[in-house]
Amino acid sequence: MWNRGWAKLFLAAAALPVAASAQFDDGSILSPVNGELPSWLRLSGEYRIRAEGYTGASYTAGNDQGYLLSRFQLNMDARPLPWLRLFAQTEDSRVLGNGAIPDAFPYQDTFDLRQAFIEIGDSEKRHFAVRVGRQELKFGDERILGSANWLNTPRTFDAVRATLNYGKLRVDAFSASVVNPVDGVFDHSKAGEDLHGLYGTISKVLPDATIEPYFLWHLGGGFKTEEGAPARRSSKTVALRVARKAGKNIDYTAHFLRQFGNIGADTISAYAMNFDLGFTWLGARLQPRIFADYAYASGDRNANDGRINTFDQIYPSNHGLYGIVDLFGWRNLRDAKAGLTLKPLRKLQCSTVFHDLYLASSRDGLYNGVGNLVVRKADGSAGSHIGEELEGTGSYALSDYLSMGAGYGHLFPGQFIKLATKGSAYNIAYTMFTYTF
């Protein structure tokens, strides 16, 4: 239900473009600074503010909240030699005006070092490069490994990454540990939470498409076997992704993933897949694009057989993939969606999407966006239909540096939500402004 707290936040956010346009329309505020610096050294940054609110949290009527998310990033990029790069990024993320949202991850991490790496070589322009330090890891559509930039505290890794880039073939090899954002202290990576991978990209074989075979080995502690014994996880993922990006009349993705390994004495046997197909009327007024997508991630059918069938989504950027309500992760999930995107103006893009969501196994549970179990009915008595989601989003470029966006999503609860939880519908709305400099 809408309340005065929501109204104040959205009215404040609505006033932002007036103030921002008055201050920033003349160009980047760092242009004079960069003009005084040597050509190999550049400063840049981003400030993002988002008014956000929801109703029906935890599927409970009356559990409503509105708040403001603020994120400031400042970058230093030094390239004193063609084969040497040093990059650092600080970040200050805050949550304001909240009554129930914690002042912690993923909402708040006041002034910290988000990235700091040295790169020898050039991963884009040269045949070989090595990057060492705190950095982002983003591959494919970030469904399995990404920065989760929508979050107020996006993800980074302490990692070593080597890139071989030659002709049609690119291979990235990395060993990484995810950084754990903790407000008020210097962020560290998680001890024992490791990810090793090989990611290949083959281009110019299929027209305007890439073939991406890859392997990921995910290690971590803090787990339990099905019998309840403490255990470590060792999960291996073998996958193949074939994709053609939007920008042509037809775009598509076919993605297949198989997981194996163990959690203590229990064996892992899981899989996932997703397919999407889009068509754009290039040159037509409004540039309409229609698209359909199906995503599947396996779930566990028997919680006592010593076999783990629930897919591990690893480190995804989930926002929007399974609805902008951001309630679901790629674990024990079936999501069929279809949508339409339009460009009424050169700087304005609008989109509407419909999702129909099910559990892959009614005997496994519902998992949230970070992969944690929300609720489970092990006997399958609540069925498998999670519900339907309808959403609308839009973005507009106010200038070369300032953009705004807004969105609304509504989850219509299905049988599983109604029987396994308190059954309330869920709504989320946001207004966002981003200034890059």
Image (cartoon, helix red, strand yellow):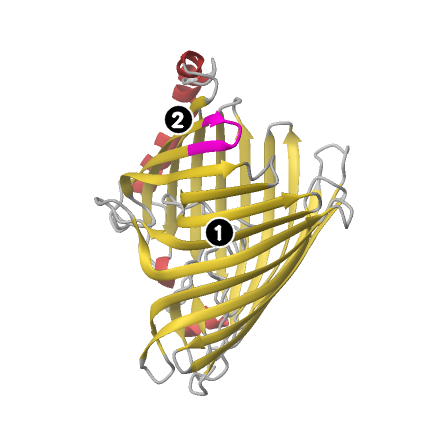
Q: Is residue 89 left or right of residue 381?
A: left
Residue 10 image offset from top left, x and y in percent:
38, 36
Q: Nearer the viewer, mark 1 or mark 2?
A: 1
Disc 1 is placed on an element classified as loop
Q: Earlier in the sequence, mark 1 or mark 2?
A: 2
Near-viewer residue (366 or 122)? 122
Q: Residue at x 43, y 35 (%)?
A: 432
Q: Is residue 405 left or right of residue 242?
A: left
For the record, the magenta segment spans: 79-86
Residue under label 1, please give it: 317
Q: CA distance from mark 1 to mark 2?
A: 27 Å
Near-viewer residue (158 or 407)? 158
Q: Is residue 302 left or right of residue 220?
A: right
- The quarter of the picture where the C terminus appears is top left
Residue under label 2, please give it: 16
Near-viewer residue (275 or 43)? 43
Up/down of 422 relative to 133, above or below: below
Amino acid type, residue under disc 2 in the picture: Leu
Residue 97 inside the magenta-drawn segment: no
Amino acid type, residue under disc 1 in the picture: Ser
